[in-house]
Image (cartoon, helix red, strand yellow):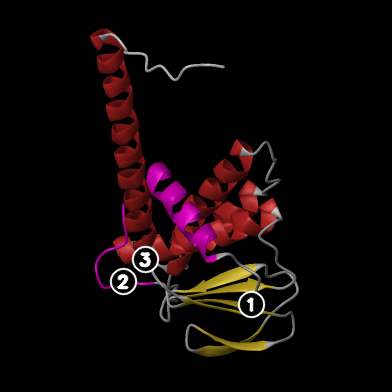
Amino acid sequence: MHANTRKTRPAGAMLAFAALLAAALLTLTFLAFADRSTEARASEVPPCEISGVALEPALLGELFDWIDRNTAYGPTPEGERLRAVRGCDVGEEIVYEGVVLVVPSELRAAYDHEEKVVYLVRPWSDRNPHDVATLLHELVHFRQFAARDWPCPQATEWEAYKLQERWLAERGIDAGLDWVQILLLSRCKRDVHP
């Protein structure tokens, strides 16, 4: 038969336990604050319609965060928001920059800066890094046009492709881009007068 005995703890042990409890509470408070910070950052991502393509909305926040860390554009100015990310198919007619466009087979994505809509050509998957890099490229255009005026829309391409290449390189993937073609694509057309 055992007697119930109460052991008393020395004062030092009680202080150590109190310090441990305080540290645990401080850690939980910090984690709760960190979660709110993440939620606040996620709320800065422009809300948009996502239709016709399997895309986790959280991915947009991750890509915008990456753009913020790798460019000087910073957060999107107040009042500017991405309206939609839409899937489309080769051969489908879409309204792009105010003109009806038949989606060509070589197109993977497009950003309509007048309507603030990203078009992703299907098949597109957020599990394919090349597809995600294509979305990143179009989100860079959104930030570029929101941040400043450009001499022509094509002038944004060089930087967008460089950032696309960097994002893929961080994942150990060679983008395989043709920089001569991109240089030509990035030039503004000049008016030629006879």
Is 126 placed above or below 105 here?
above
Compute the Cα span from label 3 to label 2. 10 Å
Which percent across, then down, holds residue 143? 38, 61
Looking at the rendered structure, the kind of residue marked 3 is Phe
Query: Residue at point 75% right, 74% down?
Result: 105
Q: Which residue is mark 1?
A: 87
Q: Indicate left or right for 23 with 109 as reference.
A: left
What amino acid does circle 1 point to? Gly
The reply to whether the C-beta atoms of the residues labelled 3 and 2 are less than 8 Å apart is no
Label 1 or label 3, whichever lies nearer to me, is: 1
- Mark 1 and mark 2: span between their CA atoms? 22 Å
Check if residue 74 falls in the magenta segment.
yes
From this view, report whether residue 99 is shown above or below residue 162.
Answer: below
Query: Which is more toward the observer, 13 or 20?
Result: 13
Query: Mark 3 or 2, which is nearer the eye?
Result: 2
Q: Which residue is mark 2?
A: 80
Q: Which mark is residue 30?
A: none
How far is mark 1 from mark 3, CA to CA? 22 Å
Q: Is residue 166 magenta?
A: no
Query: Across the whole image, how many numbered discs are drawn on residues?
Result: 3
Residue ID at (37%, 66%)? 145
Q: Secondary structure at mark 3?
A: helix
Give the residues drawn in magenta, as a range.
Answer: 57-81
Rendered residue at 42%/43% (across/down): 70
Left of 74 or right of it: where is 173? right
Residue assigned mark 3: 145
Q: Position of residue 180 (x, y in %)?
A: 63, 49
